[in-house]
Amino acid sequence: MTRFERVIRIRLLARRERLVESIASSALRLRSAWANKSEAAGDWRGLELTTEELRNVDRALLRLVQRAYGICERCGRALGTQRLLAEPEAALCNDCDPAASSAARGPPPVS
Ligand SMILES: [Zn+2]
């Protein structure tokens, strides 16, 4: 594993931990809302999105292990360092991913 891949792996694992915590607290909120018979449709959608994000992070971690990380799953070209730093779980290059143009500009500000 290269130094860059080790840095990415640490970022992915940290992100994974935050996502798992978020999913756990969403599940608790939904259970509470369900027990109180309150409307919680929005929370379900948020939980779905977070779960999908977790799947993408896990797939990226798998690609690291399989030595396929940073290679576009569609066209086979390298994704590039900037793209991977902006979106470490990216599986497609800027040309193949229509949603990639904003991510390629750089990571969002740290909040
Ligand atoms: Zn591509």
Image (tube, rainbow, N blue to C red):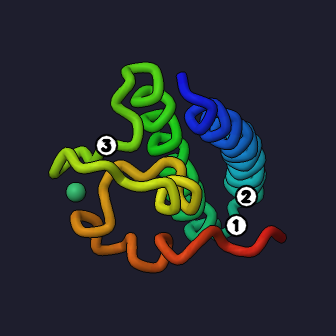
Question: Relative to 96, is 101 on the left or the right?
Answer: right
Q: Secondary structure at mark 2?
A: helix
Residue beneath label 1, please? 38
Residue beneath label 3, please? 71
Q: Secondary structure at mark 3?
A: loop
Relative height, residue 83 to residue 10 (above, below): below
Q: Nearer the viewer, mark 3 or mark 1?
A: 3
Callout 2: 10 Å neighbours few (<14), some, many (20+)? some
Q: Of the residues under marks 1 and 2, which one precedes in the sequence?
A: 2
The picture places residue 89, in percent across and down from the top left corner, at 49, 48
Between 18 and 26, the residue placed more toward the observer is 18
Please give the name of the residue rendered at 40% of the width and 77% of the height, measured from the top-left corner: 101
Gap in angstroms between the C-alphas marked 3 and 2: 42 Å
Residue beneath label 2, please? 33
Q: Quadrant of ligand 1?
A: bottom left
**Residue type at tag 1:** Ser
Gap in angstroms between the C-alphas marked 3 and 1: 45 Å
Please give the name of the residue rendered at 31% of the width and 43% of the height, measured from the top-left corner: 71
Disc 1 to disc 2: CB gap under 8 Å: yes
Quarter occupied by the C terminus: bottom right
Callout 3: 10 Å neighbours few (<14), some, many (20+)? some
**Residue type at tag 2:** Ala
Relative height, residue 64 to residue 22 (above, below): above
Answer yes or no: is residue 98 visible. yes
The picture places residue 92, in percent across and down from the top left corner, at 31, 55
Disc 3 to disc 1: CB gap under 8 Å: no
